[in-house]
Amino acid sequence: MKKIKELMTACQEIIAYLFFGVCTTLVNIIVYFICRTFEMSAAAGTVTAWILSVLFAYVTNRHWVFECRAESVTGVFREALSFFSCRLATGILDLAIMVFFVDLLHQNDMLIKIISNALVIILNYLASRFFIFQKKE
């Protein structure tokens, strides 16, 4: 029975992460689209979209996905630092993909943005699940 409960908890977490991952991706893509509408470069639009989507992701992941409540100021600081550092790494990857495929190879920017975000979602889940939001046993 304990294994079934663990499986249900894991599935609930993945479903919540996917839901908020899609919402985060929508925030990212919509902000990017708005930036491009105002004739910002792909790089500037990607950075702006990244900042707003990471803030959205931190709040949703912390409260509704992993339900991890750090108890001390130090714990919250470590959690936030880990989260933003990891997101910075995947944000740099997103930026590199956009610059390479859009600016250098002149591919469709919206298609590349969607593909890049799919990769980023997977990497961010793995980092959040196994490194950032550790639940106390």
Image (tube, grey):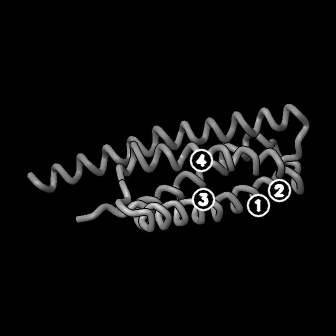
Local crowd size for mark 2, using a 10 Å CA cut-off: few (<14), some (14–19), many (≥20) = some
Does label 3 or label 1 sit earlier along the sequence? 3
Which label number is shown at residue 87?
A: 3
The kind of residue on which mark 2 rests is Val
Secondary structure of residue under mark 4: helix
35 relative to 94 in the view: left or right: right
Q: Exactly how many numbered labels are in the figure?
A: 4
**What secondary structure is found at the residue carrying circle 3?**
helix
**Cα separation between marks 4 and 1:** 21 Å
- Residue 2 in which image quadrant: bottom left
Q: In whole angstroms, how far apart are the C-alphas of marks 4 and 3?
A: 10 Å
Label 4 or label 2, whichever comes before in sequence order: 4
The residue depicted at 75 percent of the width and 57 percent of the height is 95
For the residue marked with disc 1, what is the amino acid?
Ala
- The residue identified by callout 4 is 55
Badge 4: few (under 14), some or many (20 or more) residues near its Cα, within 10 Å?
A: few
4 or 1: tag closer to the N-terminus: 4
Residue 33, image quadrant: top right
> Quick one: label 1, few (<14), some, or many (20+) residues within 10 Å?
some
SS assignment at label 2: helix
Q: Which numbered mark, 4 or 2, is in the foreground of this view?
A: 4
Q: Residue 123 sits in which quadrant?
A: bottom right
Could you tell me which secondary element the residue under label 1 belongs to? helix
Q: Nearer the viewer, mark 3 or mark 2?
A: 3
Q: Can you tell which mark lies on residue 99?
A: 2
| Mark 4–mark 2 CB contact (< 8 Å) | no
Please name the amino acid that badge 4 sits on.
Leu
Mark-to-mark CA distance, 3 and 2? 18 Å
